[in-house]
Image: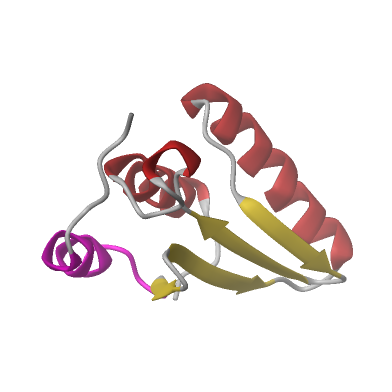
Amino acid sequence: MSQPLSPHQIEEALAGLPGWKVEADALVKSFKFNHFAEALSFIVRLGIECERHDHHPHLTNVWNKVELRFNTHDAGGKITAKDVKMAEAVEHFNWLKS
């Protein structure tokens, strides 16, 4: 079972994750692309990365907007190091810079 991060650990992680915030026990970030096809290509790339890490976000997509929410189910729906690692992975391939 994964261990939830402390508020201090989450705060430290957010310092290296531009545009990410905490909402309802999840790491959250919204992305706005130029059009639907660009948003969809981001989602496809995200899916590949999530499969690699065996961790999957809650995501919503409406036209050119994508919102991601990472938390860990086996940690009681809290934020863990696994969520931070996924947010870092997203920032690695994200071509929109905050």
Give the quarter of the image for residue 19: bottom left
| Residue 46 point in image, percent of width and height | 62, 43
Count numbered badges in the picture.
0
Task: Name the residue located 59 percent from the left edge and 73 percent from the top edge.
Answer: 30
Where is the C terminus found, in terms of image quarters?
Answer: bottom left
Q: Quadrant of the N terminus?
A: top left
The chief SS type of the magenta part is helix
- Residue 31: within the magenta? no
Q: Is residue 65 left or right of residue 17?
A: right
Colour mode?
Answer: secondary structure
Q: Can you name the residue that lies furthest to the front here? A: 76
Give the quarter of the image for residue 31: bottom right
Indicate whether 2 appears above or below 4.
above
The location of residue 53, given as percent across then percent down, is 47, 27
Instruction: Depth check: give the residue in front, 16 or 56.
Output: 56
Residue drawn 59% across the image and 61% down it? 68
Residue nearest the viewer, comparing 33 with 71: 71
Name the residue at 46% across, 52% down.
Answer: 77
Tell whether 31 sits left or right of 39.
left
The residue located at (79%, 64%) in the rendering is 61
The verdict on residue 13 being magenta is yes
Q: Position of residue 97 (x, y in %)?
A: 46, 69
- The one nearer the camera, 77 or 96, is 77
Which segment did they paint magenta? 7-19
The picture places residue 47, in percent across and down from the top left corner, at 67, 37
**Vertical relation: 86 (above or below) 13:** above
Left-right relation of 72 to 38: left
Dividing the picture into quarters, in which one does residue 50 lie?
Answer: top right
Q: Looking at the picture, tell me which residue is in the foreground, 69 or 78.
A: 78
- 87 relative to 66, above or below: above
Height in image: 18 above or below 94? below
